[in-house]
Amino acid sequence: MTVNKWTAAEVARKVIDNEELFILDVRNHDAFEDWKIEGHKFEYLNIPYFELLDGVEEILPKLPTDKEVLVVCAKEGSSVMVAEMLSEAGREVAYLEGGMKSWSSYLEPIKVSDLENGGELYQFVRLGKGCLSYMVISEGEAAIIDAVRFTDVFTNFAKEKGVEIKHVFDTHLHADHISGGRQIATNTGATYYLPPKDATEVVFDYTPLTEGLNVKIGASQIDVNALYSPGHTIGSTSFVIDNQFLLTGDILFIDSIGRPDLAGLAEDWVGDLRETLYSRYRELAEDLVVLPAHFMIIDELNEDGTVARRLGDLFKDNHGLNIEDEAEFRRTVTDNLPPQPNAYEQIRQVNMGKITPDNDEQIEMEIGPNRCAVR
């Protein structure tokens, strides 16, 4: 039988298109339990590679014959060998090119909406890491918000759309992934914005992102308005775009809220987090569509693959927005936190410009799921 090679892009389409897939994950059990490829209709079998060295005969009855089977490992090599063994046993299978390393890196651009006067808003979904980036396009110009480190994805997309990147924003100093914002600005001549309260230790020049800042994109005059919204970090800043969309950074997610502890200041910032979620955001129009910088679980994806929901719906359904007792809220976001992101302290140092790891080191820093949220 033929062994097929699938790219991360092909697997991403199966997630977004809600297709069935059976995944044989040959990583160790702890790695699989911590982080795997998620899909609404995906099924899994986790058998570590070393248990298959003597043959795959014992697992053949566990593999379906009526749906596609994908073998996955950390970097590709083990999955190729297992896929070849299965092929020799008469099974048609595929393996993931580049393994979980490639899955962590892949971005899927999805159009969120047309904007007034001909503009467009795109969401870049990093399914393997839960990161969400944005590009606003209008009249030949573009602005990027919360870009991840794969800068070519954004610059190439801008070229395809025939637009020039003029502005690049980070809603806050990220701790779970390496920002590509400053590099994009350097490569394109765009203006790079960062909240000054998050930038006290950075070693590079930037334009302050402050409350009330209004940046126009293109001749159609799409407004990108900044709204100070501390809590995840002390400088966290949201955006209202075209009076339709609220980009919340890592403050508010679809099914959760942001954690306040990644700079070691949870007790200091929990009050800011509650003030943002329970006061500042309550003053906004409930018809605004929330577009966060991350998602945690596959259930947060809409049918078209976007991660977006009305603010008014989140006020009703998001548990983090419905903890009336302040002491209980404080306990929720300080005592019941998930594990911290992998290498988050080093990632913060990278995003401050203090260290410059090579590509392999950056990959290792970012391995693992999104852990910016409290559920």
Image (cartoon, rainbow, N blue to C red):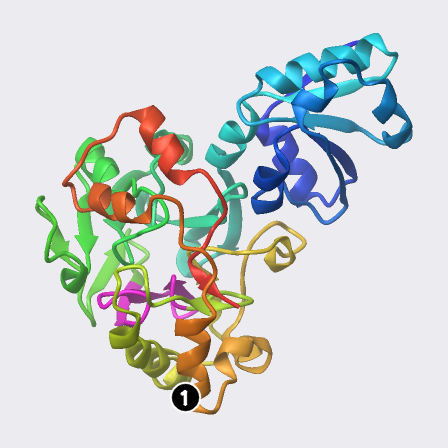
Quadrant location of residue 285?
A: bottom left
Vertical placement of residue 333 versus 194, above or below: below
The residue closer to the viewer here, 150 or 328, is 328
Vertical placement of residue 98 versus 155, above or below: above
Does residue 36 show up? no
Q: Residue 109, image x and y in percent? A: 50, 41
Q: Residue 204, image x and y in percent? A: 9, 44
Number of numbered callouts drawn? 1
The question of residue 240 being in magenta is answered with: yes
Q: Residue at x 39, y 80 (%)?
A: 281
Q: Is residue 359 left or right of residue 338?
A: left
Q: Secondary structure at mark 1?
A: helix
Q: Residue at x 60, y 24 (%)?
A: 7
Q: Quadrant of the N terminus?
A: top right
Label 1 crowd (10 A; few <14 / some 14-19 / many >=20) = few
Q: Residue at x 16, y 41 (%)?
A: 353
Q: Amino acid at mark 1?
A: Ala
Q: Which residue is mark 1?
A: 327
Vertical placement of residue 232 versus 305, above or below: below
The question of residue 178 being in magenta is answered with: no
Q: Which residues are magenta?
A: 224-251
Q: Residue 263, image x and y in percent? A: 26, 60
